[in-house]
């Protein structure tokens, strides 16, 4: 869809919108919209992004709802952008309500027209009180919204759903009410993987999950080099390696290991491979089959269950929409060891490993290329205690306290024989990587991730200091 192209459609009489403008301005002048300062922000946010604008907390008046409908619903439904939309956008830009920038940002993500992008950018800049250049303007606008924690406008999901579903009809069952902050969700540049279960070999215009992948012994995996990065999982005495080369192409595997069913998402943007048990579900609950939605939440992939279209918070493992959210489903996590193939197979010679064909003939290395200069999607502010792409081992204690261990410092500490203990957890070396172990010997489900991701999804995290 190119909403910058003029096409036949329902038109709005200019005098009606002018009258609506006068009415809206009178509402602001008379104090019906109460602008309030945003909540206090950390100093490092102010230093990087400046002071946020005041944000109204009242409902949207009918004139503004009319302008929003013309600019953001009519434009995408009719695939048009003409003087009616421009006049409506001018009305929105003059409202003094930065909440509306969320809707502007959503449309900016998809428009191919430079001219329309400039118009939307100027409107957003006016509402945010910032000068915003043409380069990566969507990212700049969204970063400010996230960092300042600008609230969503009333009926936000209605506008966002219209925009997104007009682009990808497969999202109509994704954009529904639930325990999810839709402000944080953006398009990752790929389409939804909505193939039925166990159709690994079926092509799609998406990032294709692998279901029940075939494996080989370590001896037969001659295609892997010893320094290739793998994600190692051990369940009930069985070990399996998931090469990063494959996971960067698939990003999701539904597998069975050690008699347990697993859903294994890998978010290239967050540097995080995780493993969730998808068996032993509540009564009358079918095993979730995890797929990539094509969406992101603060640069973390958004996964969903193909059976119920329930959306999950990928990093935290709980369902946030759909039937599984109504049941309060929280997936239990197993530990994932990030290491190299040579060390993993030496420590676990009986390991199995996914076949090379699941890499689809590709050999990407996103970790050391595309993401080298920081997150490529908006994440807002980042906790400054560590660099954004510093590797950490993250885990949650028995008391529910999240804690991050700087991987480089933890490796040095453990290799020299010192203990690392936090509450009920201790860290130990495992096949060249690090895992957390509970005092009772159980697996608390630790994994590696970039610091920016861990600290955003666990904003109250402790940071272990050596």
Image (cartoon, rainbow, N blue to C red):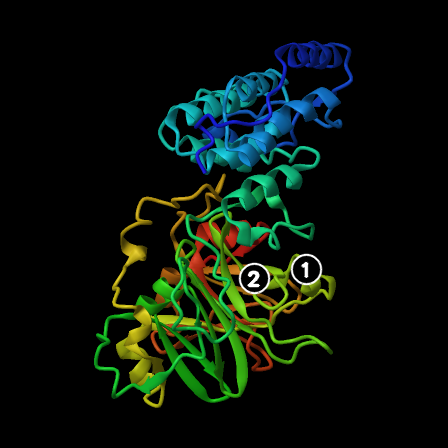
Position of residue 180 relative to residue 307, above or below, is above
Q: Residue at x 42, y 52 (%)?
A: 190
Residue 309 percent location from the top left of the image: 61, 61
**Please, what secondary structure does the residue beneath circle 2 have?**
strand
- The quarter of the picture where the C terminus appears is bottom left
Residue 141 percent location from the top left of the image: 48, 31
Q: Nearer the viewer, residue 93 or 50?
A: 93
Q: Residue at x 41, y 60 (%)?
A: 207
> In screen coordinates, is 24 left or right of 218?
right
Q: Residue at x 56, y 27 (%)?
A: 9
Q: Based on the displayed image, in which of its 4 quarters is residue 289 positioned?
A: bottom right
- Are discs 1 and 2 less than 8 Å apart at CB? yes
Please indicate, yes or no, whether residue 466 appears anywhere in the rendered image.
no
> In screen coordinates, is 264 left or right of 224?
right
Q: How many numbered circles does the render carry?
A: 2
Residue 231 percent location from the top left of the image: 38, 72
**Please, what secondary structure does the residue beneath circle 1 have?**
helix
- The quarter of the picture where the N terminus appears is top left
Residue 365 percent location from the top left of the image: 28, 59
Q: Nearer the viewer, residue 50 or 306?
A: 306
Q: Nearer the viewer, residue 206 or 185?
A: 206
Image disc number at residue 446: none
Q: CA distance from mark 1 to mark 2?
A: 10 Å
Residue occupied by mark 1: 322
Q: Based on the displayed image, in which of its 4 quarters is residue 277 positioned?
A: bottom right
Position of residue 326 relative to residue 228, above or below, is above
Residue occupied by mark 2: 304
> In screen coordinates, is 335 left or right of 224?
right
Please indicate, yes or no, whether residue 410 appears anywhere in the rendered image.
yes
Position of residue 5 relative to residue 388, above or below, is above
């Amino acid at each position: 869809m190119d909403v910058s192209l003029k096409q036949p459609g329902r038109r709005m009489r200019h005098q009606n919108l002018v009258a609506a403008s006068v009415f809206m301005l009178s509402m602001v002048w008379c104090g019906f919209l109460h602008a309030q300062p945003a909540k206090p922000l950390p100093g490092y946010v102010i230093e990087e992004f400046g002071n946020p604008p005041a944000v109204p907390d009242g409902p949207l008046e009918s004139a503004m709802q009319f302008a929003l409908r013309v600019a953001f619903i009519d434009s995408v439904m009719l695939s048009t952008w003409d003087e009616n939309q421009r006049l409506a956008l001018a009305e929105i830009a003059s409202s003094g309500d930065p909440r509306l920038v969320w809707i502007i940002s959503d449309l900016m993500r998809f428009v191919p027209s430079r001219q329309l992008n400039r118009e939307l950018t100027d409107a957003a800049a006016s509402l945010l009180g910032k000068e915003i250049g043409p380069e990566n303007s969507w990212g700049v606008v969204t970063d400010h919204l996230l960092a300042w924690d600008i609230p969503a406008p009333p009926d936000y999901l209605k506008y966002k759903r219209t925009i997104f579903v007009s682009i990808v009809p497969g999202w109509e069952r994704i954009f529904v009410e639930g325990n999810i902050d839709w402000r944080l969700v953006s398009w990752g540049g790929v389409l939804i993987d909505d193939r039925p279960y166990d159709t690994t070999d079926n092509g799609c215009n998406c990032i294709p999950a692998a279901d029940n992948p075939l494996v080989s012994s370590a001896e037969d995996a001659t295609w892997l080099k010893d320094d290739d990065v793998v994600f190692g999982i051990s369940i009930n005495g069985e070990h399996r390696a998931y090469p990063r080369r494959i996971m960067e192409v698939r990003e999701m595997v539904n597998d069975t290991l050690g008699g347990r069913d697993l859903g294994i998402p890998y978010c290239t943007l967050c540097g995080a491979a995780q493993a969730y048990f998808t068996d032993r579900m509540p009564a009358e609950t079918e095993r979730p089959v995890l797929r990539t939605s094509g969406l992101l939440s603060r640069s973390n992939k958004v996964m969903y269950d193909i059976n119920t279209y329930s959306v999950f918070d990928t990093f935290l493992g709980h369902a946030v929409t759909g039937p599984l959210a109504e049941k309060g489903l929280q997936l239990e996590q197993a530990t994932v060891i990030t290491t190299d193939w040579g060390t993993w197979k030496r420590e676990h010679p009986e390991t199995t490993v996914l076949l090379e064909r699941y890499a689809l003939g590709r050999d990407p290395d996103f970790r050391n290329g595309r993401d080298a200069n920081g997150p490529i999607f908006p994440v807002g502010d980042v906790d400054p205690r560590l660099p954004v792409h510093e590797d950490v081992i993250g885990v949650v204690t028995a008391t529910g306290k999240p804690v991050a261990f700087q991987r480089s410092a933890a490796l040095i500490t453990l290799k020299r024989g010192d203990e690392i203990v936090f509450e009920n957890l201790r860290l130990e070396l495992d096949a060249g990587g690090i895992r957390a172990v509970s005092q009772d010997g159980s697996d608390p489900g630790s994994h590696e991730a970039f610091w920016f991701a861990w600290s955003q999804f666990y904003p109250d995290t402790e940071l272990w200091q050596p």
